[in-house]
């Protein structure tokens, strides 16, 4: 009896197992990034002083904001969305003001 069952298995089986685990891990991380949490690079002076003009990254929640909205937007909040000019580009903007409805 050998102490390591992994050594007894053929090499192609080990490679196949590694490929399956790698693929499952990659798919899991890809799904996590696209559904639960995302990130984007912040460029430009509009986010000063919260972010530098170049080189900072913002991490944001996707799942909670899309399916489980918890609060209304308020002045100063940051919003991440697709660019209307280039939908493949992600932009980040700060809320400057919110229109409230008042009833009389």
Image: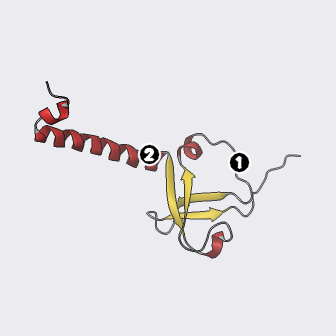
Query: Residue visible at 24% across and 40% down?
Result: 20
Left or right, 99 with respect to 87, comes to right
User: Which numbered mark, 1 or 2, is in the foreground of this view?
Assistant: 2
Query: Residue visible at 53% across and 48% down?
Result: 62
Of residues 26 and 46, the one drawn nearer to the viewer in this rendering: 26
The residue singled out by tag 2 in the image is: 32
Position of residue 45 measured from the top left corner of the image (x, y, whole percent): 63, 75
Left or right, 68 with respect to 97, comes to left
Q: Quadrant of the N terminus?
A: top left
Q: Identify the secondary structure beneath mark 2.
A: helix
Above or below 64: residue 95: below
Of residues 27 and 14, the one drawn nearer to the viewer in this rendering: 14
Of residues 94 and 16, the one drawn nearer to the viewer in this rendering: 16
What's the CA distance linking mark 1 and mark 2? 25 Å
Position of residue 63 measured from the top left corner of the image (x, y, whole percent): 53, 44
Q: Residue 72 shows which numbered tag?
A: 1
Q: Earlier in the sequence, mark 1 or mark 2?
A: 2
Position of residue 91 measured from the top left corner of the image (x, y, whole percent): 54, 64
Above or below 27: residue 52: below
Residue lying farthest to the top in this orientation: 1
Above or below 78: residue 67: above
Q: Quadrant of residue 27?
A: top left
Query: Residue visible at 51% across and 65% down?
Result: 41
Above or below 89: residue 6: above
Callout 2 environment at 10 Å: few (<14), some (14 to 19), or many (20+)?
A: some
Count the labels in the image: 2
Q: Quadrant of residue 94?
A: bottom right
């Amino acid at each position: 009896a050998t102490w390591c069952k992994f050594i007894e298995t053929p090499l192609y089986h080990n490679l196949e197992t590694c490929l399956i685990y790698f693929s499952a891990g990659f798919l899991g991380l890809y799904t996590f990034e696209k559904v639960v949490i995302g990130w984007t690079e912040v460029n430009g002076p509009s986010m000063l002083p919260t972010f530098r003009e170049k080189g900072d990254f913002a991490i944001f929640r996707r799942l909670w904001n899309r399916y489980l909205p918890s609060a209304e937007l308020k002045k100063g909040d940051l919003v991440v969305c697709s660019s209307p000019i280039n939908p493949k580009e992600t932009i980040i903007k700060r809320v400057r003001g919110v229109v409230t409805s008042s009833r009389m």
